[in-house]
Each structure stands twice: as structure tokens, then as C-alpha cells.
Image (cartoon, rainbow, N blue to C red):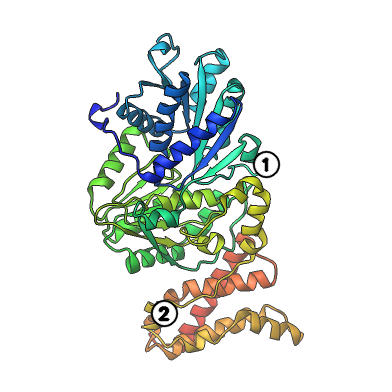
Amino acid sequence: MIDETLFVKKKLYPFQEKAVSQIIEKLKVNDQNFNLLFQLPTGGGKTVIFSEIAKEYIKHWNKKVLILTHRIELSVQTSVQLKAIKVNNKVINSEVKSLEDQEDYECFIAMVETLNNRLQENENFVQDVGLVIVDEAHYNSFRKIFQYYEGSNILGVTATPLSSNKALPLNDNYDELIVGESIKSLIEGTYLADAETFTYDVNLHGLKIGSNGDFTVSSSELVYGNYFMQEKLLFAYEEVALGKKTLIFNSGIETSERVYETFKKKGYKIRHLDSTFSDKDRKDIIKWFKETPDAILTSVGILTTGFDEPSVETIILNRATRSLTLYHQMIGRGSRKLPKKDLFTVIDLGNNVRRFGLWQDYINWTDAFKYPDRFLESRLSEEDDMAFEVEYEIPQKVKEKMDTQLIESFCMKRVYDEIVNSGEKGKEAVDRSIENHAEAIIANSEDLYDGIELQEMLQEQIEYRLKQYTKLISKSTDNYFKWLFDTYNRQLAQKLRANLDM
């Protein structure tokens, strides 16, 4: 049941009115088989625009409009907006098995899977449809519906006109793209909040690319679930986002749960949310997040669409992605404006800005629509992603405890090359690295307790050196690295015990 108090008509902004006029004109001058794609950034009000288009279409063509979504929340939001502008509509959910009353409605909103099931049983389930509107049109699940409406116009709307499947480009189904206002233009027009972006370089060595072209969840869990990445996330939050309402996006459930535990131990107000939660629990958590001023919500794959909370002040990308669409969806959750909010913070912990550029940067969406393969190849290099390694920077808290000059002077690649070129075994580079760490720790310790504490603080730096070494010898299985890491720490501890008093 939709809350009647939500039926408040929204006045269209000038750029929204322009988009409605453009699209209606395009439909007027083309025949019924003409399919149109409309691009507008997240936060630009796509639901408001296509709801107005539905109203205008019904008025001009006297035919019904069918709106397709992939989430029940989007269906309900759309129904509310249509009701506000006096468009009599019905949501086709799993409980709707037949439409004997369809003559009472001008517009229908349906989740794609539910409607597909009904159409397989009865291809005339919804009759006299002149226009099919597809929300989040970059998803390919909608394609199976198109065969039932070959005589209708189709209008797809999306923030990123790139198909979720590279093998099924959107220009297969849409004849033309209309590009709406850019992110920069919406910021300048004070329709969207601007983003201040902070990037923290991370080593993505170990990520694997799956069949969908993005990094796999399993490899992401290994990279982001470890202690060092959790510490980096916590440091980034405390450095630039402390006390701000924050959304953290993760690739996997395990990682998100660890984030929850890490922040909870520090006393921060945080909740975890993923797709396994019940509708009630999900609503309760989102209500808590909305009402709690400095709340932190860590999530997995559930808040990228259909979630609108303008009070979000910080977006943390605690994951890497090769999907430009997902990148924009995640950051877009923070772009809603409020009277006292014209700026939000983005923290990138996945080298995503290096991969895609800043969220506000200009993108030639026409080129992306016409030549998707060329567009993606020019932006994403699998080789670059897999080979990319950043220079490790020793944290400030370590520098406050010890003089790190000796450690920073050691370069694993340089030492390894020198050893191999002189005819020695490459493993000698690891032994020299242990000597280097031992010498630096001993010089900065009064006793063994100090030494063990410094060794603990240098774990991330040790891990970085060993990852460089395993890459140099082309041997980087998880088991080998674990053995090497454990052996390194054991031998280093032995040297400290031999040289430092208790």
C-alpha cells in the first residue's frame, strides 16, 4: 500500500522540462518502432522526467504506458511520482496474477522478472501499450521483454549508456541516444552537490578478472578482507570523514562484515547491510541510517540503485571495479543536495579514480553508445590493472615511533636485480631484506619488547616487499606467499631476540 501523504507533485527544473520536450518531439517525428535511449546523471531526476513523459504520451497518443524496473523499491517510487501528477497507475508485483481491471489504469509499473513470467503465460497480459519505459536501461534483463512489444516505442533511461554485458551493446536495441545535462553542468546549476575526492593508493596485486569483465568477488575478498586493508580504511575514514554520515561500498559480504567489526570495536555507530537481509531488517537499518547524524553504513551490492538519502556526506569505495556504471552509481549516492550541503566527500580505496577519472569529468556518452568496444578499450587496460603496483608509503604512526630512513632506502627490485646479475640466487634478496628490517628495528629499540612492537607495526611494509619479490620470481600462489610471509617474520623475530635484551 502506498502512503497517500507522499503524493506531492514536484515542479520540473528547466533542464528536466527541456528533456521531456526533446523526447516527446523525437517520438512524434518517428514511427512506432523507434526506440530512444536517454542519459542523465544519477541525481538528475530521471524518475521525475520519465513520469512526466508517460503523462504526456498518454495525453497525445491515448495509449497505455508500461514502465519496467528491476527493483521493487524503484517500482514503488515510480508509482508514487505518477500518482502525484495524476497518472492512474498500477504496480504489477508477484501478487498480481491477472489484470481484469486494466481498463481502469493508464500506466503499469512492473519488475522485469514478474512481468516476463506473466507474459510467458499470456503474451497479451498488458494490452494497448504504446510506450515501454525502461528504468536503469543498461541492465540486460530487460531485453527478454522487448519481443512482446515490437510494435511499441521503447524509451530507455540510464546514467551510463553502456551495457552491463559487453557482448550485448545497447545500440542493438536503441536507435538513438539523447544526452542530458552533464554532472559538471548540474553542479554549476546547483542541482547536484560537488565531490571532493581523496585517493589512497592500494596494491591490487591478487585481484582476478571474471567472465563479466569486473574483478571477482572471491579475489576482492582476499585483497580487502585482510587486516592491513581494514586498517587503511579506518585510517582514511578518521583522516577525512570522521563524524560524517558515511556509506561504505564493498565487493563481498565477508569484507563488509569485517568492516562492521573493525569500526564497531572503535566505538563508531555502524551497521552492515547486504542482500540476504529481510525487507523488515533492511527498512529498519535504512531508517536508523537516515535518523542518525554521524551513522556509518557498510553494504554490498544493495544501495547502488533505488536508494536516495540526501544526508549522506561521505562515500567510501572500499573496493575496485572495472565497471564505469557501478563507479558512477556508487558515487552518485552522495550527490543529492540539501540547503546546507553543497559538497560531499569521496574516498577511493580501489584505484578507481586512476581507472576512470574523477566523477565530475566530462564523458563522451555519444561515443560510448555508438562505439562501446572502442570506448571501453581506451579507458580500461586489463594489463595495466593487473600489473599496477603503487609505491608503499610508511604510515605516519610508524614514523613517529622510529627513524624509517634505512627501511625506505631498501628497494626489493634493485637488490634482486643486483643479486641475480652477480650470479647469486634470487632468494638472497629476501635474506637481505630481513637484515635491513632487523638493523632498523634494533637501532630504534631499547629492548625486545620495543623490537616486537616495531615488527608488528611494519607488517604491511613487509607484506609489500614480499609481494614485490613474488612478482619478480613469477611465483605468487596464496600458499607460497603465506609460507614466505610466516618464515620472514619468524627469522626476523629470531634476529631481534638474539640482539635485544628482555
* Residue farthest bottom in this picture: 443
Left or right, 256 with reference to 283 = right
Please give the residue where the numbered disc 2 appears in the rendered image. Answer: 454
- At horizontal 47% and vertical 19% (from top left) the residue drawn is 63
Left or right, 357 with reference to 297 = right
Q: Quadrant of the N terminus?
A: top left
Q: Quadrant of the C terminus?
A: bottom left
Percent position of residue 475, x then y: 68, 66
Q: Is residue 459 above or below residue 300?
A: below
Q: How many marks?
A: 2
User: Separation of disc 1 and disc 2 at Cα?
Assistant: 51 Å
Question: Does the CB distance between marks 1 and 2 fall below 8 Å?
Answer: no
Which numbered marker is on residue 167? 1
* Residue farthest right in this picture: 423
Answer with mark 1 or mark 2, whichever residue precedes in sequence: 1
- At horizontal 54% and vertical 52% (from top left) the residue drawn is 324
- At horizontal 43% and vertical 8% (from top left) the residue drawn is 100
Percent position of residue 133, x then y: 49, 30
Q: Residues within 10 Å of mark 2 (few under 14, many from 20)?
A: many
Which residue type carries mark 2?
Leu
Identify the element where label 2 is drawn: helix
Q: Quadrant of residue 443?
A: bottom left
